[in-house]
Image (cartoon, grey):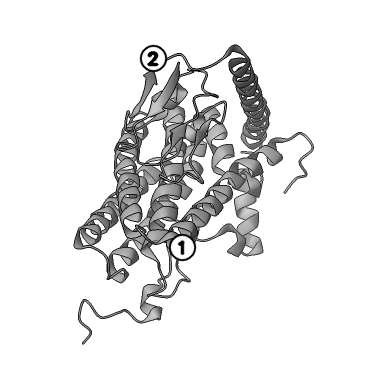
Amino acid sequence: MPRLHDPLPFEAAVREPPYRDQDDLDEHEREVLRDRLGDLRNNNPFVLCELARRDPRWLAALLSPLLSAEFRGVDVIGRLAVECRDVPWNLTLGLARQAWDEARHVELDTQLLEGYGSHVGEYPDRPFYPDTNGVAPGTLDPAVLLRVVHTALEGFALSFFDQVRAVARETGQHVLDRCLDHNIADETMHVALGDYWQSRLSEGKPEVRELARLAQELAEVTFEAAARAAEQLAAPSAPAG
Amino acid sequence: MAYVIAPTDCINCGKCRRECPTQTILFFGRDDEKHWVDPTGCIDCDLCARACPMDCITQEPEPVLQLAELNRARARARAFFGQRRRFARTLGSYADAVVAATRRES
């Protein structure tokens, strides 16, 4: 019987996620999605924001990737809390609390999604952020991951949630507006937690600091790719997809 | 005048950096690993202060910019907003077309 502090076997750290990558859909599923979205490339957060601004029935497609990100948050932060052992106990507690926050966000977003007539899994995911499911236990460097997940990803989420909240306010979606308020408050705490601890953990370790900086720069470039993709799609000469 | 970021309160979320129209808020490569407003590029637009979730960006009363610096920074800001406007317009037209087409189909 393994004890709580025993490392998990690798298989147990990977579970079937409730979201699927758009690239993994079969031809029939792609056809259904194309009918629903008009173009598969419209499954882009920046494009969906504009579509939802014009017609609230697009809100479900917009919220779906936010929900996927929260599911991923439960996975990643849960793993960090359990697998990063040689870290101060206060960080473990902070991560445990954050995993609970992410679980609450899943609950919020699931209910919002259902409120807009959709359900978990109706829209596939277009992840513009790193996937840690394939990372073996023990290979997660907490300082680097805090920089990528907390500083880069959650920092970017703060900016994007502001845009979605603007859409919610413009279109009179008061419940969504309120939920995003809660979400933004939590995300701010998560960024603060990550910033404090990544700085503490990499103190006196210039190589870790450098690796973390590179990882954050790379993550930011990846997020910016979503905006570039939207820009290219909206350009008048964009071919149909 | 220029805006300053209180380093002890900054959580490095990067919102101010993404909002800054003159791209004058620096982070990568700084030894203290904190966001910092380069006063020679700040045009006092206040966008960073409004974006900051920690309310840790304030206006410094000391005049800093020379006219030439200010004009260069303003030109960068005009280019930034011009690019944003073009993006919003293109994306808006595209979204109008998609919404109209999918309404017709349904």
In the rendered image, the vertical position of residue A167 relative to residue A144, given as above or below: above
Task: Determine whether B18 is above or below B41 in the image.
Answer: below
Query: What residue sits right under mark 1 in the picture?
Result: A207
Q: A50 or A92, which lies in front? A: A92
Image coords of residue B60 (percent x, y): 39, 19
Residue name at image x 48 percent, y 49 percent? A65
Q: Where does the image place residue A92, in percent across and percent down from the top left?
A: 24, 61
Q: Secondary structure at mark 2?
A: loop
Task: Determine whether A126 is above or below A45 in the image.
Answer: below
Q: Which mark is residue B25?
A: none
The residue labelled by disc 2 is B61
Residue kind at label 2, given as amino acid type: Pro
What residue is at 76 percent from the left and 34 percent from the top? A236
Q: Is residue B27 at least partly visible in the picture? A: yes
* Camera-side residue of B101 and B33: B33
Mark 2, chain letter?
B
Residue A11, horizontal then vertical, whole percent: 40, 80
Quadrant in the rendering for residue A116: top left
Mark 1–mark 2 distance (CA, rounded to whole Å):
39 Å
Residue lying at the far bottom of the rendered structure: A1
Describe residue A93's horizontal placement relative to residue A74 as left or right. left
The residue marked by circle 1 belongs to what chain? A
Residue A42 percent location from the top left of the image: 62, 43
